[in-house]
Image: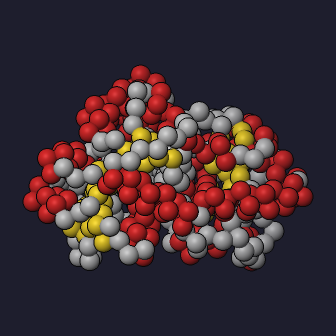
Amino acid sequence: MKIAIIADVLGEENNGTTITVTRLIANLKKRGHEVRVVSPGKGDEEGYYAVGKRDFKIFNEYFEKNGISLAKPNEKILRECIGKSDVVHILMPFSLGKAAIKLCAELHKPVTTAFHVQPENVSSHFGLLRSRRVNSYLYTYFLNGFYRYCEYIHCPTAFIAGQLRAHGYTHDLRIISNGVDPAFTPARGKKPPAYADKFCILTTGRLVKEKCQEDLIRAVGKSKYADRIQLFIAGEGPLEGKLRRLGDKLPNPPVIGFHPKEELVRIINFCDLYVHPSYAEIESIACVEAITCGLVPVISDSKMSAARYFALSERNLCPAGDIKEMARAIDFMVENPAFRARQREEYIRYAERFQIDKCIDKMEEMFADAAAGVHREQEV
């Protein structure tokens, strides 16, 4: 098939959405599909068409600090790419996506969309992360301004599909994981000498409010084993300075920074525990990558996070935002290596469902169904 991918945000692979979209594009090409990508960057790469970035005037510095670059619509490029495609997949409900979806209607092109932007990802920038009224409004705003123009929506988890149904989305919702790169495989590694006697805990994600890394740092400080724990916070973002200052109070200050894929796999495979304190997640591919390698997790049970569904037992959950209970959950894992060893094997088997090939099979099916006008009943 000839597939056009329209991405309002697509830049450096330092966030979950860009990583999963880049992976989707690469795997579709690998299967022989002709893929054209319209995005704000990468125009020098084959098959990519750069439309430039929107100018937010006095807010540009804020957007740059938060790693956000939104595409500026370019009708000529959109019309060229959409016109040559059998099906169009639009990733986000922003300006480029809105312009593309209206062109698809004009040109009578089959179109699918994805739900990668959780309202909480937007409301957090305005200090309204936990406002039900604001987040509910954003679900309605996305629906009326964008999703009502399509019939198919890719939902990375049943959790977000349920949220869409609850907010009035009557579409053909395709529940398809974003999938895990084959590089993430279980291969226990030796700890670097500096951490040989430490209990190593990993968390991965953008350093932003909704990921709640601050809660984890505080929980490690309250652990009975704080002097033994070495925390790794893999990611980058606007809260890095604040997290470093808070982490400096721990007996062993956390290692904070972004890691290329190969280095992240190495860290996962020598760590003892993965902790996911996030308040809001559509899927949390970072958590999936960790458990795919057999790293046992402790996950926040936030009702706004799909990650809680990855818990295979109550011991893998802790109350969202409860620092003391998170510390107790960590202490249990430190004290029970046999439990972790048993769960490691359980998680390796459980994570087989996230293999990228299986996910791409389902994405291809959605594209083919959209081109043929076929709908499938899915339980949400």
| Residue 8 horizontal side relative to residue 29, left or right | left
Please identify the quarter of the rendering in which residue 325 is found: top right
Picture coordinates of residue 59 (x, y %)? 23, 45
Picture coordinates of residue 282 (x, y %)? 50, 44
In the image, what residue occupies the spot 69% across and 34% down?
319
Q: Can residue 137 be spotted in the picture?
A: yes
Image quarter in which the C terminus is found: top right
- For this orientation, the residue located farthest to the top is 133
In the image, what residue occupies the spot 55% across and 51% down?
284
| Residue 27 horizontal side relative to residue 297, left or right | left
Image quarter in which the N terminus is found: bottom left
**Color scheme of the displayed model:** secondary structure
Residue 187 position (above or below residue 306): below
Picture coordinates of residue 363 (x, y %)? 44, 58
Q: Depth check: 160 or 214 in front?
A: 160
| Residue 85 horizontal side relative to residue 331, left or right | left
What count of labels does the image hold? 0
In the image, what residue occupies the spot 74% across and 61% down?
349
In the image, what residue occupies the spot 73% across and 62% down?
348
Picture coordinates of residue 217 (x, y %)? 64, 48
Q: Can residue 127 be spotted in the picture?
A: no
Residue 258 position (above or below residue 209): below
| Residue 308 horizontal side relative to residue 167, left or right | right
Q: Depth check: 208 or 45 in front?
A: 45
- For this orientation, the residue located farthest to the left is 76
